[in-house]
Image (cartoon, rainbow, N blue to C red):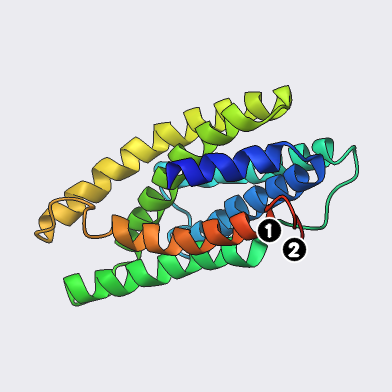
Amino acid sequence: MRERIQTVLKRIASEPTLEARWLNTLSLLEFIGVRKISRTVADRHPSLEVLGHLADETRHALAFKRLATEVAGGTEPTDYLCAQEAATWFQTLDRELAAWTQRTLHREDVHLNYLLTTTLVEQRAMLLYPLYKAATRHPAVRAELGKVVTEEQSHRLDIEETCLRRLAEAGVPDFSALKPVEERLFEGLLAALEQHTAPALQVG
């Protein structure tokens, strides 16, 4: 899958219009993350950890939107690259992890679901963003991706540690049962990106 991701990102980076739409999609995904946090663990005044995560994700959504505008030549793009598939990946993952939590604990646990979704989404980001950084031709995009990776890595490790502790309390040793769920769902987004960036197509 890594090689397929690299190929898609190189195609995206070779065409400014595609890259602007891709950056707009990344902004959308970060915004979906912000909205999920706000509606769940930040529906009331949250902890310092959650506020920090919320602030980071908001900044990333803004940064990617600004970069999309810059790559598009100064006009804020209104189009996305595979926005529906991207949103489906994130939102379906969140729902499936919530269902898994319900089955495992025999009760709803909003905070554990937040931890699980955050962990798996950010593990994907830690693969995707460095590959995109290597592919892009825009210095500003490379610089921002470096900042995003540093920020994501910082809170991801804290969240993973908390998540693993909570899983251990439920008798679950690690994420091995859950990673295939994310991989299966991401396959749908990757296939759509491959289709819409195919050299003879580049539409949608």
Where in the figure is residue 64, as x and y percent of width and height?
Answer: 69, 41
Residue neighbourhood size for the residue with mark 1, other residues' Cα within 10 Å, grouped as few (<14), some (14–19), many (≥20)? some
Query: Does residue 66 show up?
Result: yes
The residue identified by callout 2 is 204
Which circle marks residue 196 in the picture? Answer: 1
Residues at marks 2 and 1 touching, judged by CB atoms closer than 8 Å:
yes
- Residue 60: quadrant of the picture: top right
Q: Residue at x 90, y 38 (%)?
A: 74
Q: Is residue 174 above or below residue 55?
A: below
Q: Earlier in the sequence, mark 2 or mark 1?
A: 1
Where in the figure is residue 72, as x and y percent of width and height?
Answer: 85, 41
Q: Residue at x 38, y 57 (%)?
A: 183
Give SS at disc 2: loop
Residue neighbourhood size for the residue with mark 2, other residues' Cα within 10 Å, grouped as few (<14), some (14–19), many (≥20)? some
Q: Is residue 48 above or below residue 167?
A: above
Q: Residue at x 53, y 39 (%)?
A: 6
Give SS at disc 1: helix
Where in the figure is residue 189, as x and y percent of width and height?
Answer: 54, 60
Left or right, 13 with respect to 17, comes to left
Which circle marks residue 74 in the picture? Answer: none
In the image, what residue type sits under mark 2?
Gly
Q: Residue at x 53, y 47 (%)?
A: 54
